């Protein structure tokens, strides 16, 4: 499955319906729900990882991997819908990110501060 196909399929489970970028403002409940959902799910990934470190001495079991995959999938769902609301295909988001990171790597600025390095 490619990312754009995922994005289309993920959109069918959006409880806010078929929102389009022209329909939404930043304070629309659909946007707000997705932003809050994204940070909530990212927090769940962090929480599961914290417990692996705290309770399991950093050893990641197969069960932990399964749990983390599910949470990462939830993060991906929110990212896909936010991109859709912005009128952007998920594959474009991924390409832009890889291009940015590749440029930083080639210039030796992968580590450092700030977005524009």
Image (spheres, rainbow, N blue to C red):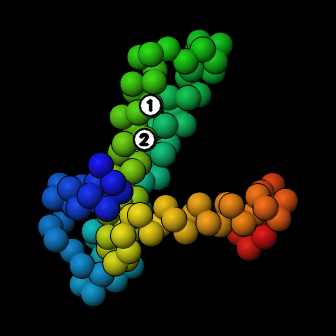
Q: Is residue 112 visible?
A: no
Q: Residues within 10 Å of mark 2 (few under 14, many from 20)?
A: some
Q: Is residue 59 left or right of residue 9?
A: right
Whether tag 1 and tag 2 are in contact, CB under 8 A, the answer is yes
Residue 102 position in % (x across, y down): 68, 61
Q: Residue at x 38, y 74 (%)?
A: 88
Q: Residue at x 42, y 41 (%)?
A: 72
Residue 27 position in % (x across, y down): 36, 77
Q: CA distance from mark 1 to mark 2?
A: 6 Å
Residue 86 position in % (x across, y down): 37, 77
Q: Quadrant of the C terminus?
A: bottom right
In this view, 76 is above or below 63: below
In this view, 110 is above or below 49: below
Q: Is residue 10 left or right of residue 66?
A: left
Q: Is residue 107 visible?
A: yes
Q: Residue at x 27, y 87 (%)?
A: 22
In this view, 95 is above or below 40: below
Label 2 sits on residue: 72
Of 112 and 90, nearer the camera is 90
Residue 108 lies in quadrant: bottom right
Q: Secondary structure at mark 2?
A: helix
Label 1 sits on residue: 68
- Give the number of marks: 2
């Amino acid at each position: 499955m490619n990312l754009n196909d995922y994005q289309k399929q993920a959109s069918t489970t959006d409880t806010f319906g078929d929102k389009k970028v022209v329909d939404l403002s930043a304070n629309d409940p659909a946007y707000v729900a997705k932003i809050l959902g994204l940070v909530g799910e990212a927090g769940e990934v962090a929480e599961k990882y914290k417990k692996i470190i705290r309770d399991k001495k950093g050893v990641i079991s197969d069960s932990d991997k399964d749990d983390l995959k599910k949470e990462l999938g939830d993060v991906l769902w929110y990212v896909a819908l936010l991109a859709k609301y912005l009128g952007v295909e998920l594959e474009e988001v991924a390409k832009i990110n890889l291009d940015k990171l590749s440029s930083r790597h080639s210039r030796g600025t992968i580590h450092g501060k700030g977005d524009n390095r």
